[in-house]
């Protein structure tokens, strides 16, 4: 009986419609990501989840760690000014936003809201930002954030609720309305982080944005890693994904040719009429074949990446 092919997270993400808007997914260990996007309310700079669907999934897996995946369109020209003033503007006027063509250069970075959500959700151990091509829906790469044992915990665990329901309620209340020094401090720091992202665009200096994430991750003990999809690479400042240039592929092709050419020393009985190496030695013969297989596999891998 043939086993059913397992669908990869990349395939799930790329199969969703409307790649020009942000999407949200929940993934539990050894399971396929589940799309929880509210397609009626999500847009190119902000995703809205289907609260009922998300609640039922989390309730069913209560207490289990999960991976939160959301997408960023690779080419969007709008972003919210996430500062305090920007937030007030949004409450007053729903279309208040800043526009900048440079936003596509920081699409792999989380927003301040992303970081706040990540830290306040105790069961969310990993957050993944998948950058998608706005037209084709293909994934260009991933920004992965992981909590460590030293990452501060802001929300109560389920065991906390059982032991001290009142204290847990007050902790959540403190987060919801910003009472207490710790939540206010975090809100100010994510606000400062967003301002640095905007400053990077205004000054055309992506190092400001890249360093802002590094500093925040170091302070809150968060591991970060950029994983490009096939055919793409991270830019030097680690703020977006860009397609590999043809020259890079040419260099990789030369490496393959050198490997295959080198095999001639092992798979040929003589070179230019002078006997250099004989194939009577079984060890040499096997070694040559192993190198040939490695060269072919590497070549196929590069072709698949393109």
Image: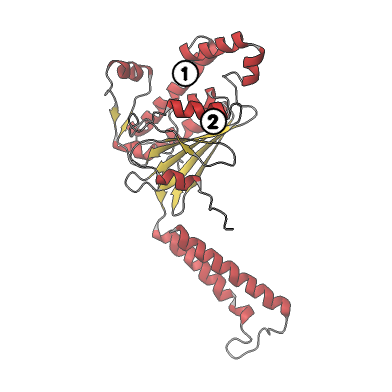
Q: Residue at x 46, y 29 (%)?
A: 53
**6 or 167: nearer the eye?**
6
Can you name the residue that lies furthest to the front here? 1
Q: For this view, does 3 lie left or right of residue 24? A: right
**Up/down of 172 relative to 51, above or below:** above
Front one among 159 and 206: 159
Residue named by callout 1: 187
- Identified at 72% across, 76% down, the residue is 283
Residue 18, position in %: x, y? 33, 41
Q: Secondary structure at mark 2?
A: helix
Quarter-wise, where is residue 168 in the image?
top right
Q: Give the camera-side residue of 218 and 223.
A: 223
Q: Which mark is residue 217?
A: 2
Label total for image: 2
Question: Are there few (<14), some (14-19), or many (20+) residues within 10 Å of tag 2?
Answer: some
For the N terminus, give its image quadrant: bottom right
In this view, 254 is above or below 132: below
């Amino acid at each position: 009986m043939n086993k059913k092919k397992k669908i990869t997270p990349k395939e799930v993400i790329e199969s969703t419609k409307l790649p020009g808007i942000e999407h949200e997914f929940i993934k539990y260990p050894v399971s396929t990501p589940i799309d929880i996007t509210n397609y009626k309310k999500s847009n190119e700079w902000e995703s809205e989840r289907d609260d009922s669907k998300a609640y039922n999934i989390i309730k069913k897996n209560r207490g289990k760690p999960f991976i939160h995946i959301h997408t960023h369109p690779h080419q969007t020209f709008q972003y919210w000014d996430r500062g305090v003033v920007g937030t007030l503007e949004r409450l007053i006027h729903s279309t208040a936003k800043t526009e900048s063509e440079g936003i596509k250069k920081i699409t792999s970075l989380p927003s301040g809201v992303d970081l706040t959500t990540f830290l306040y959700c105790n069961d969310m151990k990993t957050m993944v930002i998948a950058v998608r091509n706005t037209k084709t829906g293909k994934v260009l790469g991933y920004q992965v954030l992981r909590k460590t044992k030293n990452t501060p915990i802001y929300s109560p665990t389920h065991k906390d609720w059982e032991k001290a329901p009142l204290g847990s309620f007050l902790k959540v209340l403190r987060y919801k309305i910003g009472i207490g020094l710790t939540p206010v401090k975090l809100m100010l720091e994510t606000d400062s982080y967003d301002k640095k992202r905007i400053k990077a665009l205004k000054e055309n200096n992506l190092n400001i944005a890249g360093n802002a994430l590094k500093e925040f991750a170091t302070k809150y003990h968060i591991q970060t890693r950029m994983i490009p999809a096939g055919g793409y690479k991270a830019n030097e400042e680690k703020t977006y994904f860009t397609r590999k240039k043809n020259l890079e592929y040419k260099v990789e092709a030369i490496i393959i040719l050198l490997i295959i050419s080198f095999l001639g020393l092992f798979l040929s009985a003589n070179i230019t009429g002078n006997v250099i190496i004989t194939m009577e030695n079984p060890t040499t013969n096997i070694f040559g074949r192993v190198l040939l297989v490695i060269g072919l596999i590497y070549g196929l891998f590069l072709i698949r990446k393109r």
